[in-house]
Amino acid sequence: MSFYDVCTDFFKNYEEVSAADFYRELFPKGELQKRDESHNWKYNAIACEISEPVKRFTIGDDLEHLDDLLKSENFVIMSPISYVGKARIAKNARLLYALVFDLDGIKGLKGLTDLFFQMQNDIHPYPTFTVNSGNGLHLYYFFDIPVPLFPSVTIPLEKLKNRLTRQFWNQYVTTFYEEKNVQYEPIWQPFRIVGGITKDFKKTGHRSRAWRTGKPVSLEQLNRYVPEEYRMPKNAIQYKSEMSLEEAKEKYPGWYERRILNHESKKHWTVKADLYEWWLRRIKNETVVGKRYYCIMCLAIYAKKCGIEFERLKKDAEELREQFDRMTVEEDNHFTQKDVRDALEAYRDEFCTMPINSIVHFSGIPIEKNKRNGRKQADHIKLMNKMRELKIELGELSANWQGRKSAQETVFIFLAENQYITAREFCEKTGLAKRTFYKYKKIWLELMLEKLDHLR
């Protein structure tokens, strides 16, 4: 009996779902962009028909093209992601609607039975849908709320997915359980569509089929099924914002003008290499098991932010890998070269705006912020201004010294506590000029609105 027939028999008591219903549930009505809509924070799915040449199809809210693609006798692939623009590339990805696991080499009925026995005993979570792709399975975990693909989300999510993948590919379920055979797929990976042809279609006429085997899940639920080291940190878990574009326009008019109307790119500070060296020293001495991956991930972020060459970063990371691997307590938890390669994916411009709080959360290494020694904000700023005046009087500072960092910090502190403060109120409380307020408010908005930038 073929594996396709084994699945047909095994899932006979489960609800089989049509391709149309499957994709309507994946992308609910109103979730994707309509044909006559634009600039409304809604995006499109993208399907590709593997033909000569490859054909790309935009899937909008009406799921147009899906019926035709389901009739195709070519392979058709699609990822459970919405994209901005027409290119199906990672930087254009906006929202993730499901996490998908590919499982091959299943040991027939015994492997299927063992897989679901493990789920029944809470070793694995039940997938929302199980899809028979022909010779294997695609396990779809639909999210109850879509997940935005911010850099601060994708890296820990990849790590979580890889660990779950390794747990699914075990000796009771698949013949390919050895590490060298495990297929670690990125979260962006497209899969053969439900209702699309299988590899042996020309011989058998088979198309992939889907059965409902569970409920939608959350990232918190998936976290339960992996060791602590592989879980997503709490502040990395994020879901789709409910704020509409019109609400954002009213709340953040400056951002709306720059990013939506003028299509300006976001910015980040470039800092001295001392920051990289400082962090390298910290993680050499303070990293613990459970945080090894994230400490190198943060090193990659600082390397990019400081203009450190990638080759230097790779060399440092490999030396750290050897040190970190010696910390291993459990034999199935070695720190591998693959862990390092995955962590170095953070060496990208878009990760440079990751907040300090996230760095602390990921790495477990505390970073002290500037203290006001218990003073109220206004009193602290008055004291700093008086100290500046005294230093000028004593000749320690020139009279035209502007105190760039202190001015920036002052503006940031005020905006963090009251983003609606006016320039007049700010100047009355600090004695700084309006142009200083507007200069650093612009930078503050660029940094604080990273989330909105991804939903542009």
Image: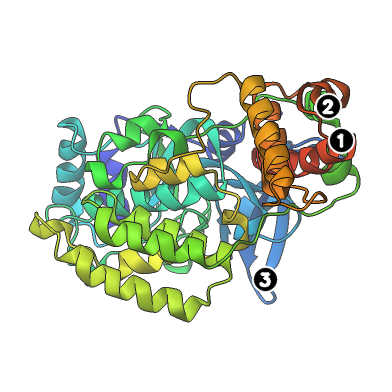
Mark closest to the chain's N terminus, 3 or 2: 3
Q: Residue furthest front?
A: 394
- Mark 1–mark 2 Cα distance, whole angstroms, equals 6 Å
Q: Which residue is mark 2?
A: 427
**Quadrant in the picture for the C terminus:** top right
Contact check, label 1 and label 2, Cβ < 8 Å: yes
Q: Pick the quarter of the image with the N terminus.
A: bottom left
Query: How far is mark 1 from mark 3, CA to CA?
Result: 58 Å
Q: Is residue 307 above or below residue 152?
A: below
Please tell me how crowded label 1 is: few (under 14), some (14-19), or many (20+) other residues with Cα within 10 Å. Answer: some
Question: Which of the two residues, 421 or 327, is positioned nearer the viewer here?
Answer: 421
Asked if marks 1 and 3 touch (Cβ < 8 Å), the reply is no
Q: Earlier in the sequence, mark 1 or mark 2?
A: 2
Amino acid type indicated by mark 2: Cys
Which dot, 1 or 3, sits closer to the camera?
1
Q: Residue at coordinates 73% horizontally, 49% vertically from top-left?
A: 404
Quarter of the figure with residue 28 = top right
Q: Residue 230: image x %, image y %? A: 29, 47
Q: Is residue 46 above or below residue 312?
A: above
Badge 3 amino acid: Val
Residue under label 3: 54
Residue at image position (73%, 25%) is: 419
The reply to whether residue 41 is in sight is yes
Looking at the image, residue 193 sits to the left or right of residue 400; the answer is left
Compared across the picture, whether 345 is left or right of 110 comes to right
How far from the left and from the top, in percent, is residue 147? 53, 38
Drawn side of residue 142 relative to residue 32, left or right: left
